[in-house]
Amino acid sequence: MNKNKNRQMNNIFLAAIALSLISSGCSHSKKLTDSSMHFAKNIVVAHRGAWKTNSLPENSIASLDQAVKIGCAGSEFDVHLTDDDSLVINHDAVFGGKHIQKSSYVSLLETKLSNGEPIPTLYQYLSHGIQQHTTMLVLEIKPSEISEERGEHTAQKIVELVQQLHAQPWVIYISFDYAIIKKVLELQPDARVQYLNGDKSPLELKNDGVMGLDYHYSVFKKHPEWVKEAKDNNIVLNAWTVNNAEDMKWLIENKFDYITTNEPELLFGLIKRP
Ligand code: MG
């Protein structure tokens, strides 16, 4: 009798383990599909997070949270590689008087952001960013000031971390450095990438497998034909960094997919939210 009971308990135990494995497998695969995402259907990308209205530090976790809170489709941030191979979030090449790419991660912790946050690592930023499903993470890979190889190494470290965290559905990669753009695509051919430098036509990008362009808005005034060329070739159109209503209206009239701005609230005021 006892033996039977033990066997029954064992069976229940094994069934419970099997069930938990199946369900964890499901949630894992769910994480990797776009169908579990509910990205906001608007054109607003907050540049370095939504920092301005609440005087938050740019590129902080708090400014990412604010971009999510106000409903931005995307929130942009900048990534550098430190001297000891840590990936950190900051716009400028220098943080707290130290040249990021020539400094150790620990030495950067001596300075805090104005809201008390330490300089975020990419690991912290992505781990936090994938807790929500409404705002895409627009990840700018800063070029290396040391060598092209170091730049490609930076891209590799970033793509590996994004994959390790299963953050691919959230991430759009952007860079001014075309070698970095190509390296990302070599490592992850289906990655969503947008080139920033403004010197390639939509067709040139398409031929290299680049799915989008994110150029300074003045580039489109010089090359208005690129707007149609991009649309005809399914190249995503994004423009930076657009902070006044007049320029925003021009881009809205030209049906840009995204507008990257320091003034997301102003842009929200000009578009109809679905
Ligand atoms: Mg940037």
Image (tube, rainbow, N blue to C red):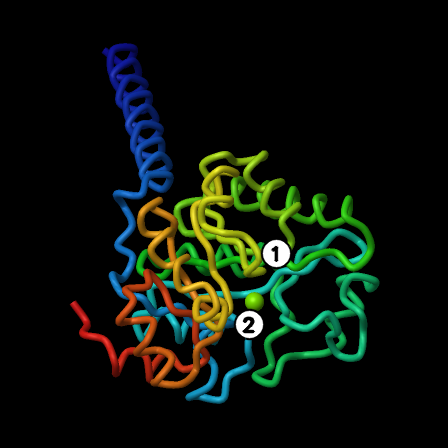
The x, y position of residue 151, in whole percent, is 72, 50
Q: Name the residue that disc number 2 marks.
A: 59
Q: Which mark is in front, 2 or 1?
A: 1
Image x and y of residue 74, in percent = 39, 63
Residue 98 is situated, as x and y percent measured from the top left of the image, at: 81, 73
Q: Is residue 35 above or below residue 18?
A: below
Whereabouts is ligand 1, in terms of quadrant?
Answer: bottom right
Q: Which residue position is annotated with label 1?
A: 141
Camera-nearest residue between 107 and 194: 194
Please tell me how many numbered marks the rendered image carries. Answer: 2
Q: Is residue 220 above or below residue 178?
A: below
- Residue 201 location, x and y as percent? 49, 51
Image disc number at residue 266: none
Check disc 1 and report its element: helix, strand or loop.
strand
Quadrant of the rendered image containing residue 238:
bottom left
Nearest to the observer: residue 160 or residue 173: 173
Return the residue nearer the eye: 199 or 213: 199
Determine the residue positioned at 77% across, 44% down. Answer: 149
The residue positioned 49% from the left and 48% from the top of the image is: 193
Q: Kindly give the residue lying farthest to the left in the view shown.
A: 274
As shown in the figure, which amino acid type bears the numbered disc 2? Answer: Asn
Work out whether 70 lies above or below 137: below
What separation in Å lies between label 2 and label 1 (alpha carbons)? 13 Å
